[in-house]
Amino acid sequence: MVETSKGGLFNTEKLIFGIRQVTQITGVSSRQLRYWEQQNYISPIQQKKGTSRQYDMHTLLKIANIQRFLSQGFTLSVAVEKAIKVGREAPLIRDFVLSRMNGVNIESDDRATIDFGFLDDSHKQRVLGVIDHGKTSFEIIDEV
DNA sequence: GTTCTAACA
DNA sequence: TGTTAGAA
């Protein structure tokens, strides 16, 4: 069987983007990408001398996040720090949600609930993530 | 035609 | 940071 990173649908780590694609996807100019690289804020995949740069998924997301913080008014260095922070938090959030995800119940066009499993080891109550008309909330329900 | 490096309005 | 030059 082919190796896919973390049990995902496919190995996102093997998605490669050329500098052109990165500029189109993130809105960051090629000049900026080269400058950020020069400042050691980002690193393309190992490339030889004058060949074109290629970026992996991780770097693409980092670039997109830096851009997001820049557009929010932060300086480049601060934007980079915040992007790095997000990069560290994302996997934790992902793992947590995936580990607690017990199923989704679409109750209507406007309401759905996500079953996050038991509240605690007593297994008497269950935690539901609610999406109602776009509004999110939690509900604790007694286990039948 | 695109990307690279280096330099400069 | 944008833009431009000349080379790859």
Image (cartoon, coloured by chain):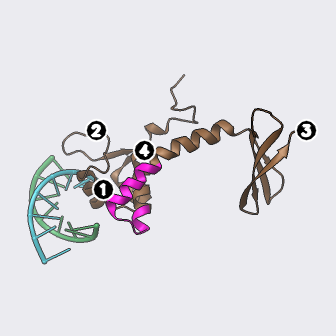
Chain colours: A brown, B cyan, C green
Residue A50 falls left or right of residue A79: left
Around disc 2, counting alpha carbons within 10 Å, would you say few (fewer than 14), some (14 to 19), or many (20 or more)? few
Q: Do the numbered discs 4 and 1 sit on residues whose CB atoms are within 8 Å?
A: no
Which numbered disc flags the more N-terminal residue, 4 or 1?
Answer: 1
Q: Quadrant of the N terminus of chain A?
A: top right
Chain ID at mark 2: A
What stretch of residues is rendered in magenta? A69-86
Query: Residue under circle 1?
Result: A33
Query: Residue under circle 2?
Result: A46
Q: Residue visible at 36% across and 45% down?
A: A55
Q: CA distance from mark 2 to mark 4?
A: 14 Å
Query: Residue under circle 3?
Result: A144
Give the camera-side residue of A126 and C2: A126
Residue A58's disc number = 4
User: Can residue A30 be seen from the camera position used here?
Assistant: yes
Residue A38: x %, y % from top left: 23, 52
Q: CA distance from mark 4 to mark 1?
A: 15 Å
Q: CA distance from mark 3 to mark 4?
A: 43 Å
Secondary element at tag 1: helix
Q: Residue visible at 63% across and 42% down?
A: A97
Q: Are marks 3 and 1 on the same chain?
A: yes
Which numbered disc flags the more N-terminal residue, 2 or 4?
Answer: 2
Which numbered disc flags the more N-terminal residue, 1 or 2?
Answer: 1
Q: Do the numbered discs 2 and 4 sit on residues whose CB atoms are within 8 Å?
A: no
Chain ID at mark 4: A
Q: CA distance from mark 2 to mark 3?
A: 56 Å
Which numbered disc flags the more N-terminal residue, 3 or 4?
Answer: 4
> With respect to residue A16, does C5 lie above or below?
below
